[in-house]
Amino acid sequence: MNTPQTWDTLTWLYICIVAFMVGGLIVASERWHGKLTGDSDLNKPQASHSRATPRVGGLAVVAGSLAGLLVLGPSNMTLTWLWPVLFIAAMPVFVAGLLEDITKDIGASKRLLAAFLSAAIAWWLIGGVSRVGFSSVDWLLAYWPVSLLFTMVAVGGCTHALNIVDGMNGLAGMVATLMAISIGLVALQVQDIPIFLIAAALASATLGFLVWNFPFGRVFLGDGGAYFLGFMLAELAVQLVVRNPGVSPFYALAVLFYPVFETLFSIWRRRFKRGTPIDQPDALHLHQLVFRRLVRVTFSRDGRHAVPALCNAMTSPYLWVLTLIGLVPATIWWDNTLILCISLVVFASVYIWIYSRLVSWRRPSWLLLPSIGRHTK
């Protein structure tokens, strides 16, 4: 592979600034488009904000990423075709998400179908899942219909999963940034420079958006942004495994495991625990329990008035740390299937333990914010 000549600090800063400026334009022009783009339904179960807020922040992430493509692409022949292909493939699910952000009338099933379509386009253009670490399954994946179906479900599901955890200021954006950094670091270790550059550009663009999103939530990532990042990260994880035999297939699962596990757990909780439709929104995601039972209670029990946006944002660092429980070992032992599997089990165990404690109001005192911890027996 040709080594690019322009991936220095100024490049990543440029990408970040482009995303920051587009985010700033969205915020500054809110009075003209807010009626269309604003998330004004404050009574829906998953709502945790106190004012109508533009939910088209994904435009900033896409703009920053596109700027990176234009700067970095010409210096690397592999990147020149890989990145445009991923952008083209991402458009169906990004557009479907963006239309939902504007019209609030694109059903979850339609958006999921768009995610499957994006995954199918990527499979057609650059290939898809070809190995998962089990010989019998890998043998089946050698047949293109099986590989296509598996890729559509895996990539489409992961795309949709990131949107599930997009519920607090800075949560999905920083989780996506951490995942992109992990993919970039592993790609750098195996000298897959195109994957490294795309992952680093995604991280830089998302950080530019986060300036407006965290902590005060001036603009939301929205379905379009969450789907775009989810698709790109899922495809990068798949391509990293496909292009580099030394990377364990379980790394692709480990790097995306938080949103994937949140989605699977939510399906189980809704379908088998509560007997409700799996696509019916509720307020029982882990980040929502952390918000109500670890963060918001701090202000109410201290007798202070909470700053809603700040109270919302104080939830996210809890989930960032949880994400790192899985990401750190995945980034270090990307070629060790056994350790990756152990890390998945550890993450799932920690998640379930925290969830079970919070949902039953048996919150651990050491998880409470300091001002509450001093008054809690």
Image (cartoon, helix red, strand yellow):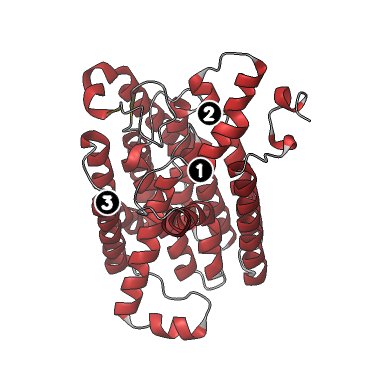
Q: Which residue does the image show at 44% across and 25% down from the upper left?
A: 217
Q: CA distance from mark 3 to mark 2?
A: 27 Å
Quadrant that contains the C terminus: top right
Q: Earlier in the sequence, mark 2 or mark 1?
A: 1
Q: Which residue is mark 1?
A: 177
Tell me which amino acid carries mark 2. Answer: Ala
Q: Which residue is mark 3?
A: 111
Residue 237: assigned label? none
324 above or below 254? above
Considering the numbered disc 3 on the image, is that residue within a helix, a strand or a loop?
helix
Q: Earlier in the sequence, mark 3 or mark 2?
A: 3
Q: Where in the figure is residue 86, as x and y percent of width and height?
A: 33, 55
- Find residue 359 and report its image quarter: top right
- Foreground mark, 2 or 1? 2
Q: Which residue does the image show at 37% across and 38% down from the upper left?
A: 61
Q: Where in the figure is residue 55, as x and y percent of width and height?
A: 33, 32
Q: Where in the figure is residue 156, as x and y percent of width and height?
A: 35, 59
Q: Which residue does the image show at 39% across and 80% down from the upper left?
A: 141
Tell me which amino acid carries mark 1. Answer: Thr
Q: Which residue is mark 2?
A: 313
Q: CA distance from mark 2 to mark 1?
A: 16 Å
User: Of residues 183 and 139, which is closer to you in this image?
Assistant: 139
User: Of residues 185 and 58, which is closer to you in this image?
Assistant: 58
Considering the numbered disc 2 on the image, is that residue within a helix, a strand or a loop?
helix
Q: Earlier in the sequence, mark 3 or mark 1?
A: 3
Q: Is residue 34 left or right of residue 319?
A: left
**Residue neighbourhood size for the residue with mark 2, other residues' Cα within 10 Å, grouped as few (<14), some (14–19), many (≥20):** many
